[in-house]
Image (cartoon, rainbow, N blue to C red):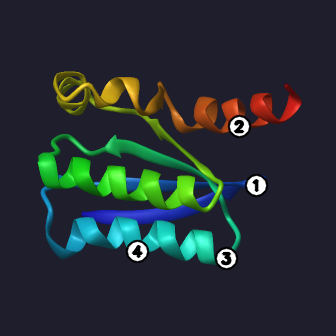
Amino acid sequence: MKIKEKFDKNVAIVTVSGNMMGGPETTALHEKVKSLIHDGIKNVVIDLKGVKWMNSSGLGVLMSCFGSLSKAGGKMKLASVADKVESILMITKMIEFFETYENAERAVASFQQEGRS
């Protein structure tokens, strides 16, 4: 699994590719998010366009990231969720929990919209 980050205004876009199946690679995603929080970044988009499959461990890491950001007063949104991953979110009812967007650009724009309301 690979993790890349970039920034768009005050939003970190963390792009993940590979399967999220648990283990040290998946844990690295949570570590990245905690690092961003430590640096004062509290709005994060997790771009899953490169993730074709996720098991319960991968879902658990997304929940951990969400929890860490919420505790710090931040927000996390998901982008580019593949059909198989979306089906896991639907089965577990996590689709109601996570805000999902068709791509990272729209997810970033949603943060800007919230800032105006």
Say if 63 sits above or below 114 in the image.
below
Which residue was labeled with disc 2?
Answer: 111
Q: Secondary structure at mark 1?
A: loop
Mark 3–mark 4 CB contact (< 8 Å):
no
Q: Are marks 2 and 1 in contact (CB under 8 Å)?
A: yes
- Residue displayed at 51% across by 31% down: 103
Q: Is residue 20 visible?
A: no
Q: CA distance from mark 3 to mark 1?
A: 12 Å
Picture coordinates of residue 45 (x, y %)?
54, 47
Q: Which callout, 4 or 1, points to the residue nearer the camera?
A: 4
Q: Secondary structure at mark 4?
A: helix
Q: Residues within 10 Å of mark 4 (few under 14, many from 20)?
A: some
Name the disc covering residue 39, or none: 3
Give the secondary structure at mark 3. loop
- With respect to residue 75, does 106 lie above or below? above
Residue beneath label 4, please? 31
Q: Quadrant of the N terminus?
A: bottom left
Mark number, residue 10: 1
